[in-house]
Image (spheres, helix red, strand yellow):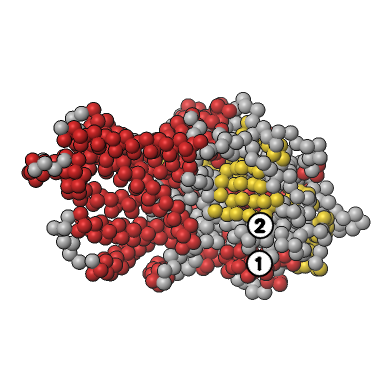
């Protein structure tokens, strides 16, 4: 186990280097720079700014400087938020996104797995159709629409929940529900398909014929064997959810990290763009490692090669 | 049987979960309190995170909205955008407008109790001009002697910059040449003082709460980045502690969300940042609705180095073929039609400076230029940034030119930064742009189209225009100065037409009835020190009368008994 974690950690270094390098190159290819503004600056001022941020150096020199800083854990400076480093920005925003993402993930798992199981067990009934309809809506309706609907129903019409902002536990309910819609639907659909497949296995019939109650058969045996595909998707899903959602954070005015995936690009905030990519890659690596470890617990036959 | 039992158990588990969620929702809802006003607190929406609260390096209106309530400069604006004394109780304009001497009030304190001194201005201005600071707005101080030289590294000694503290309460500023608009710069965020000890002690983080030291009506109490800023009334403020004790500035980027918060009484006022066009339509007749014309003019620029716009007759024809009244109808935010570059509220404005709407004359001019009935007119591109309102504007212009001149133009849409780069590198024959005033003087608009200005994407260069602007900048007599600007505006919009002005932008606001004393100005600067929150203001509360002074172009308060050797505006 420790060997697996260690090897993954070592592999993470070239992966992160590749992500940093590709992003570094891409952001400099895109037309428009961080200091292009409605009011064109005099060339003398532009020269001062470029000197301050080392943008007057050649691209290879900038690359070497950037990697040097990165090796020391310094993600750079923001060209937009001039008094804050990228480390400061992420330290403020990432915990908020993790909080919201974890809540949405919990809802997705707590609601999605039982919903999918129930649909599979009661295949072809109204419950099944309702579950399929719900998951189809969850997958196909975009989150900004779901968010707007929830705001209208609970915030404006019923006035039982806050419309937006991030002040208390109440303020987390609507954004967490909005963010959880899509993953809940995915998890439910995947669970249903997987449970249906496992229910056809001979050993399920054997277990039932030996007198094991159906509840125990499903919950203790069928579900455990059905969870492998669900757990597989939970890796990337976790990375997506806890690094924040631009749409949900935007419509609910949540100070998370998701917005930076878009605004950093719009502002050509080079270091911030690269930092968001790196953080996402790192969290994805960690999530996938945890998923690999989880496989061995769910099915002892699985041996993950270190 | 067991299958049925299983189904029932699973169903029961699901029902339990559902009930738990519903109960949780209900319990949380029960503890919510719906409020109207929050006591002595103004809640507003900034729309975005201020990039910085360091007024030496910041350049954007969001940051200025906060800084304007934290700081006060040598002068400040009235609601009508005239300059009035603030840190400076009086000033003298000497040597034909080349030298200013400001006399500071002795009772102005920083929020940590220290007295404000002239050296605080000297430090801030030198810091802004220091090349290492890389301040984008450093060029606002270029009218000062040696400011350009120091900022560009040609001069290493900051003491040679034309600003010095004669004593703690006297500040002297020497200009390169007379600049009649200079007094307005002393109210702008780029000219505010700073405390050297605080900036040097905390470095880049000096603007964080608990570290920042300010001298305005409010102090920075809390700053949750990307979410909320809280200001508290400053008990040491020289003009008296404001009636409103707290200002909560949220950063809600989505207008629909912000407007929903307003409708739910969770915000006390909203402006364009929180106002969709449909909301404007819906609320236009509400007593809470206000609309103010801004000092932001929108225009179509012609690249005069590209055919067919090398010919001024073609440019004039296009300008005259555009009916400006249509923009308010399609944009629906109360836009004011504008066919000249100086807005009506500024000196130098004349209704006759503009091109006017005259399709008949436009067709005649086009024929004279060699394109009778639009024949042989090349298909040219009109560049615009990727925004809904600009798309509506350029589509309307495209349609009007087709109908009035039988001229076909292509619309080219680019992402904002790409658009800016194109405009600065290789402007297309036509482009859509706008310009907002930094201070309430025609110079801020008119300088844009001088030959040397880096923002002049028309590439138009006219010696007479340049001379008129140079003369107007130095002219101390307001009547003569206004006349010079009027002449230049006529040359720009009616005779040479490197631009076709279209409309003035507006600010749309909704203010709750319990907010008293909210004032709006054309610079879109928001000052909250005179606001009162409550059903009925007490008899002791009243807006300070000094805040309601005259119109732009009024100004300076000269110290009695001290003759100004140069002409001054009065």
* Foreground of the two, B231 or A223: A223
Q: Nearer the viewer, mark 1 or mark 2?
A: 1
The quadrant of the picture occupied by the N terminus of chain B is: top left
Please tell me whether residue B16 is drawn above or below residue A4 in the rendered image.
above
Please tell me whether residue A209 is drawn above or below residue B467 in the rendered image.
above
Please tell me whether residue B314 is drawn above or below residue B159 in the rendered image.
above
Chain name for mark 1? B
**Mark 1 to mark 2: distance in Å?**
18 Å
Secondary-structure class at tag 2: helix
Are the residues flagged by discs 1 and 2 in contact, CB closer than 8 Å? no
Residue B475 picture location, percent across and down: 76, 51
Residue A179 picture location, percent across and down: 38, 43
Residue located at (22% from left, 40% from top): A117
10 Å crowding of disc 1: few (<14), some (14-19), many (20+): some
Q: Is residue B8 visible?
A: yes
Secondary-structure class at tag 1: helix
The disc at residue B473 is none
* Foreground of the two, A250 or A31: A250
**Displayed quadrant of residue B96:** bottom right
Provide the residue designation for mark 1: B198
Provide the residue designation for mark 2: B190
Residue located at (66% from left, 57% from top): B190
Q: Is residue A297 left or right of residue B498?
A: left
**Displayed quadrant of residue A206:** top left
* Foreground of the two, B162 or A234: A234
10 Å crowding of disc 2: few (<14), some (14-19), many (20+): many
Residue located at (49% from left, 34% from top): A160
């Amino acid at each position: 186990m420790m060997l697996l974690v260690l090897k993954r950690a070592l592999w993470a270094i070239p992966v992160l280097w590749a992500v940093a390098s590709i992003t570094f190159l891409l952001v400099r290819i895109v037309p428009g720079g961080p200091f292009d503004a409605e009011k064109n600056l005099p060339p003398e001022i532009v020269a001062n700014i470029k000197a301050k941020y080392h943008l007057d150096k050649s691209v290879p020199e900038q690359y070497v400087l950037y990697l040097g800083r990165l090796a020391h854990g310094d993600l750079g400076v923001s060209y937009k938020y001039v008094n804050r480093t990228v480390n400061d920005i992420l330290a403020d925003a990432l915990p908020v996104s993790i909080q919201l993402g974890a809540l949405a993930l919990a809802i997705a798992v707590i609601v999605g797995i039982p919903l999918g199981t129930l649909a599979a067990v009661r295949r072809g009934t109204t419950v099944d159709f309702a579950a399929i309809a719900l998951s189809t809506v969850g997958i196909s309706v975009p989150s900004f629409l779901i968010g707007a609907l929830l705001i209208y129903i609970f915030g404006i019409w019923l006035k039982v929940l806050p419309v937006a902002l991030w002040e208390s536990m109440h303020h987390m309910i609507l954004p967490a529900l909005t963010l959880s819609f899509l993953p809940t639907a995915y998890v439910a659909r995947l669970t249903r398909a997987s449970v249906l497949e496992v229910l056809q296995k001979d050993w399920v019939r054997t277990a039932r014929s030996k007198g094991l109650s159906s509840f125990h058969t499903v919950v203790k045996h069928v579900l455990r064997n059905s969870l492998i595909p669900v757990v597989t998707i939970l890796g990337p899903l976790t990375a997506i959810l806890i690094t924040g959602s631009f749409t949900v954070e935007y419509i609910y005015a949540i100070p998370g990290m998701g917005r930076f995936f878009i605004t950093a690009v719009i502002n050509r905030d080079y270091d911030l763009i690269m930092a968001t990519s790196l953080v996402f890659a790192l969290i994805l690596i960690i999530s996938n490692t945890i998923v690999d470890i989880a496989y061995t617990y769910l099915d002892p036959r699985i041996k993950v090669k270190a | 049987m067991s299958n049925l039992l299983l189904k029932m158990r699973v169903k029961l588990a699901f029902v339990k979960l559902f009930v738990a969620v519903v109960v949780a929702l209900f319990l949380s809802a029960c503890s919510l309190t719906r409020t109207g006003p929050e006591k002595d607190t103004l809640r507003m929406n900034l729309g975005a995170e201020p990039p910085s609260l360091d007024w030496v390096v910041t350049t954007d209106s969001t940051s200025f909205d906060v800084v304007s309530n934290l700081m006060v400069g040598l002068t400040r604006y009235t609601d009508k955008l005239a300059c009035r004394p603030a840190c400076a109780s009086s000033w003298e304009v000497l040597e034909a407008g080349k030298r200013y001497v400001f006399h500071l009030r002795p009772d102005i304190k920083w929020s940590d109790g220290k007295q404000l001194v002239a050296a605080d201005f000297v430090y801030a201005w030198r810091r802004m001009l220091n090349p290492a600071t890389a301040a984008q707005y450093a060029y606002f101080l270029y009218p000062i002697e040696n400011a350009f030289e120091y900022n560009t590294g040609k001069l290493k000694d900051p003491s040679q910059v034309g600003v010095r503290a004669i004593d703690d309460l006297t500040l002297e500023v020497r200009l390169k040449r007379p600049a009649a608009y200079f007094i307005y710069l002393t109210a702008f965020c780029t000219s505010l003082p700073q405390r050297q000890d605080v900036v040097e002690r905390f470095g880049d983080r000096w603007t964080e709460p608990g570290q920042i030291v300010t001298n305005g009506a409010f102090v920075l109490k809390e700053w949750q980045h990307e979410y909320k800023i809280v200001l508290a009334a400053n008990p040491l403020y020289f003009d008296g502690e404001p009636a409103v004790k707290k200002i909560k500035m949220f950063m809600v980027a989505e207008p629909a969300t912000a407007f929903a918060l307003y409708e739910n009484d969770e915000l006390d006022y909203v402006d364009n940042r929180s106002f969709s066009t449909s909301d404007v339509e819906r609320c236009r007749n509400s007593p809470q609705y206000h609309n103010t014309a801004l000092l932001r003019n929108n225009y179509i620029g012609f690249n005069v180095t590209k055919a067919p716009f090398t010919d001024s007759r073609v440019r004039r024809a296009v300008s005259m073929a555009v009916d400006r009244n249509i923009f308010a109808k399609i944009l629906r935010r109360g836009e004011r039609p504008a066919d000249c570059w100086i807005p009506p509220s500024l000196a130098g404005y004349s209704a006759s400076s503009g091109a006017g709407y005259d399709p008949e004359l436009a067709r005649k001019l086009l024929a004279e230029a060699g394109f009778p009935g639009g024949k042989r007119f090349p298909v040219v591109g009109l560049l615009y940034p990727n925004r809904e309102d600009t798309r509506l504007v350029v589509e309307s212009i495209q349609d009007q030119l087709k109908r009035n001149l039988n001229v076909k133009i292509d619309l080219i849409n680019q992402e904002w930064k790409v658009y800016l780069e194109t405009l600065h590198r290789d402007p297309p024959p036509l482009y859509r742009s706008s310009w907002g005033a930094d201070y309430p003087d025609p110079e801020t608009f008119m300088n844009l189209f001088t030959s040397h200005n880096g923002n002049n994407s028309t590439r138009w260069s006219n010696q007479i225009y340049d001379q008129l602007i140079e003369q107007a900048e130095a002219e101390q007599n307001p009547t003569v100065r206004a006349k010079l600007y009027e002449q230049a505006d006529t040359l720009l919009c009616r005779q040479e037409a490197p631009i076709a002005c279209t409309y003035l932008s507006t600010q749309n606001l909704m203010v709750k009835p319990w907010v008293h004393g909210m004032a709006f100005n054309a610079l879109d600067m928001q000052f909250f020190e005179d606001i009162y929150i409550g059903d009925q203001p007490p008899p002791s509360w009243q807006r300070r009368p000094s805040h309601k002074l005259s119109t732009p172009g009024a100004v300076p308060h000269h110290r009695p008994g001290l003759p100004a050797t140069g002409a001054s505006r009065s």
